[in-house]
Amino acid sequence: AQSVSQHNHHVILSEAASLELGCNYSYGGTVNLFWYVQYPGQHLQLLLKYFSGDPLVKGIKGFEAEFIKSKFSFNLRKPSVQWSDTAEYFCAVNRAGGFKTIFGAGTRLFVKA
Amino acid sequence: NAGVMQNPRHLVRRRGQEARLRCSPMKGHSHVYWYRQLPEEGLKFMVYLQKENIIDESGMPKERFSAEFPKEGPSILRIQQVVRGDSAAYFCASSRSGSTDTQYFGPGTRLTVL
């Protein structure tokens, strides 16, 4: 069965620090990969997605993620975080052509001003 | 363009009662997804529907849970004879089409079973 593993449940960083959130998935076929973010009091929203092409994907607000097929990974990065990046981040995967999306447990990021 | 709407935002039920959760997708979206989130857990897929059709309900419990997306009106997630373990946040998402299409999420309904 498909599954998504996010390595860190809670991350605390100071402003301007670099961020990398790990995400690994288990599925042998072709997949679509997503990172969603939920800011305090707001809806879940899409940060970025990968379904084909360049494995380095750029999203909103300076975030990027790299798909490494051999490692079944899709880690999220940002070179310099801001206080406003405080949120919960979810990695998700679905099978190419499918609709059932599997979410990781989420990582809560707190950025100290 | 209004986003995905869910109501009620909070719902309290006693054990054995029925819970009805509503989801109105974004305008122009014909695909609806329901997810459940338990405390400290990620979203768990429950069901995927298109207008008048259930496409994938592999994440739905076999009993007491049902979902519909009629030709007119919102999608409904119905939980009969609720139990304490049903207490969770239930999120709805919609998309225009396709597995690569962005899912837009609603604010969720928080169900509490007393």
Image (tube, rainbow, N blue to C red):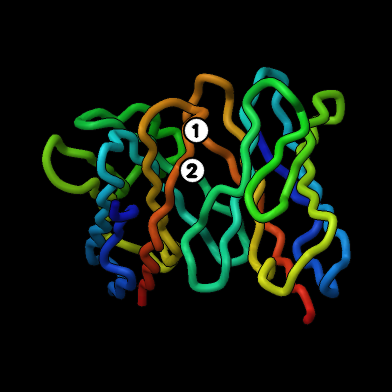
Quadrant where the image shows the C terminus of chain B:
bottom left
Q: Quadrant of residue A23?
A: top right
- Give the side of residue A53 with respect to residue B84, left or right: right
Instruction: Name the residue type under label 2.
Output: Phe
* Number of the label disc, if any, that sits on residue A100: 1
Foreground residue, A47 or B51?
A47
Secondary structure of the residue carrying numbered label 2: strand
Give neighbour class at mark 2: few <14, some 14-19, many 20+ (Cα, 10 Å).
Answer: many
**Mark 1 and mark 2 in contact (Cβ < 8 Å)?**
yes
Vertical relation: A40 (above or below) A63: below
* Number of the label disc, if any, that sits on residue B45: 2
Give the residue drawn at x 76%, y 38%.
Answer: A74
Give the residue drawn at x 58%, y 40%.
Answer: A102
Give the residue drawn at x 79%, y 36%.
Answer: A66
Q: Quadrant of residue B94?
A: top left
* Number of the label disc, if any, that sits on residue A39: none
Work out whether residue A47 can be spotted.
yes
Give neighbour class at mark 1: few <14, some 14-19, many 20+ (Cα, 10 Å).
Answer: many
Work out whether residue B80 can be spotted.
no
